[in-house]
Image (cartoon, rainbow, N blue to C red):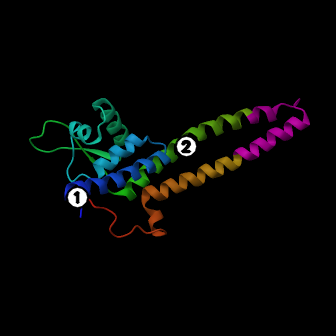
Amino acid sequence: MNILPFNQKLEEARRDYIESLAETMEMYGLSPSMGRLYGTMFLQEEPMTLDEMCHLTGMSKTSMSTGVRALSSLKLVHKKWRKGVRKDLYEAEYDQMRSFVDFFCQLWEKEIQLNDKAIQETESHLAELLADDELASEDRIRAKKNLEKIQHSKEYYAWLRHLVDAFESGDIFEFIPIPTDTTARKD
């Protein structure tokens, strides 16, 4: 009977989950290497330096630094401080509910801001067209239909704003409760 040592079995188990996270993060537009980096950090017991991450993932220090910065901007990784340690330490966010909320709220905020500006500009241009007394009737109809579609878009973005507010305030969890023990964090 071939019995693998504990550390080897543990690494195999971790590897499966890390690859799963890499695939999941790719679904949300992040690179698989960022997913592997996050997964590696997520399963570590202690915060890690960039050198330690390089050793565990095989990524270059430059790629590692870029990945950590990107994950930090998404609030998936946090810088930690430990007395007597001169190098920067990083730790993954263990609260996946919080990560979900932060990640999607950031994306939705960007979507709202980008499209809010475009909607305002489009409405302004359409209003100019409709104010033209010489506009042909078929063109007027087309412009009005476009304006109606823009109005529906405004309603969608108002709803999305409401959704973001519900997530950020925690009100959403009154309707969809968070399981009582969602983290493995040892704060």
Q: Nearer the viewer, residue 19 or 121?
A: 19
In the rendered image, residue 118, in percent from the top left (x then y), is placed at 63, 36
The answer to whether residue 74 is seen in the rendering is no
Quadrant in the picture for residue 36: top left
Quadrant in the picture for residue 112: top right
Q: Decide whether residue 122 is among the magenta residues.
A: no
Please tell me which residue is depicted at 10% across the width and 44% down the height of the picture. Answer: 83
Magenta residues, start to end: 126-150
Q: Amino acid at mark 1?
A: Leu
The answer to whether residue 173 is seen in the rendering is yes
Residue 4: which numbered mark, if any? 1
* Closer to the eye: label 2 or 1: 1
Q: Is residue 158 left or right of residue 79?
A: right
Q: Quadrant of the N terminus?
A: bottom left
Residue 148: which numbered mark, if any? none
In the rendered image, residue 57, in percent from the top left (x then y), is placed at 29, 41
Q: Amino acid at mark 2?
A: Glu
Q: Nearer the viewer, residue 159 or 50?
A: 50
Please tell me which residue is depicted at 33% across the width and 37% down the height of the picture. Answer: 69
Predominant secondary structure, magenta span: helix
Q: Nearer the viewer, residue 112 or 80?
A: 80
Q: Earlier in the sequence, mark 2 or mark 1?
A: 1
Helix, strand or loop under label 1 = loop
In the rendered image, residue 144, in percent from the top left (x then y), is placed at 80, 42
Q: Residue furthest front?
A: 1
Question: Which residue carries the number 2 mark?
Answer: 111
